[in-house]
Image (spheres, grey):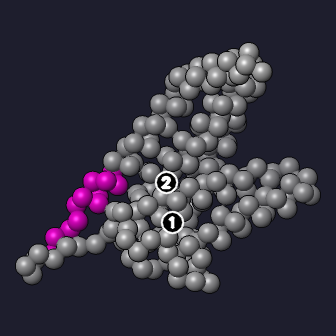
């Protein structure tokens, strides 16, 4: 995936949570949470850029990287240290990054312990196609990546800037209170 999709998907997930929280408690998240999760969504690529490096990976693109942030979060929460939410946001952002990369490329999930990948056949592979001795770029892949960028960013803007999701959640909450 391209960087905009990683950032937008992380922002979208936090924006949905923010709308749910506003509908229930009427309290939104502080804006620094959005900055942190947006940065966390792109953080693995800042450590080890791999956009066109097929077959190459690092610890930042394995399941252990988000788990490091989750372990730090749980440890800080256990010790009741105030800024533990930063590590929870980094866990969520890096996990979303990993999931998106699993869709668009080969990710060695348990690297460096194993070369196991989620699937050998990549949905949107980054490669060149040879037809009768002439090499062509797989433009289909790039078009799909840009579509993902636009879709994630569009959904993020829609969820964040409209009250549609809040209204739906309030209706669900109101309906559930009468059913019980």
> Can the viewer see residue 127 in this picture?
yes
Give the total number of marks visible in the rendering. 2
The reply to whether callout 1 and callout 2 are in contact (CB within 8 Å) is yes
Q: Identify the residue at image location x=54%, y=41%.
A: 12
Q: Which residue is mark 1?
A: 45
Residue lying at the far front in this picture: please name it: 179
Quadrant for residue 68, please give it: bottom right
Q: Identify the residue at image location x=7%, y=79%.
A: 132
Callout 2: 10 Å neighbours few (<14), some, many (20+)? many
Residue 153 screen position, x and y as percent: 44, 41
Callout 1: 10 Å neighbours few (<14), some, many (20+)? some
Quadrant for residue 24, please give it: top right
Residue 144 screen position, x and y as percent: 31, 53
Residue 77, placed above or below residue 131: above
Q: Which mark is residue 28?
A: none
Magenta segment includes 7 = no
Residue 81, placed above or below residue 45: above
State the CA–CA distance, disc 1 to disc 2.
Answer: 10 Å
Residue 160, placed above or below residue 93: above
Magenta segment includes 136 = yes
Q: Is residue 41 left or right of residue 144?
A: right
> Can the viewer see residue 50 in this picture?
no
């Amino acid at each position: 995936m391209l960087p905009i999709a990683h950032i937008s998907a992380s922002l979208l997930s936090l924006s949905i949570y923010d709308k749910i929280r506003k509908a229930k408690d009427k309290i939104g998240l502080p804006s620094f949470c959005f900055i942190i999760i947006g940065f966390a969504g792109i953080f693995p690529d800042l450590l080890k850029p791999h956009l066109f490096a097929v077959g190459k990976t690092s610890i930042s693109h394995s399941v252990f990287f988000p788990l490091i942030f989750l372990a730090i979060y749980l440890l800080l929460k256990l010790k009741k240290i105030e800024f533990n939410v930063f590590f929870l946001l980094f866990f969520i952002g890096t996990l979303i990054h990993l999931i998106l990369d699993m869709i668009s490329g080969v990710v060695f999930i348990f690297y460096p312990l194993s070369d196991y990948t989620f699937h050998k056949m990549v949905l949107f592979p980054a490669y060149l196609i040879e037809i009768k001795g002439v090499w062509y770029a797989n433009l289909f892949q790039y078009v799909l990546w840009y579509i993902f960028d636009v879709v994630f960013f569009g959904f993020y803007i829609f969820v964040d800037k409209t009250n549609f999701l809040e209204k739906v959640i309030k209706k669900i909450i109101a309906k559930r209170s009468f059913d019980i």
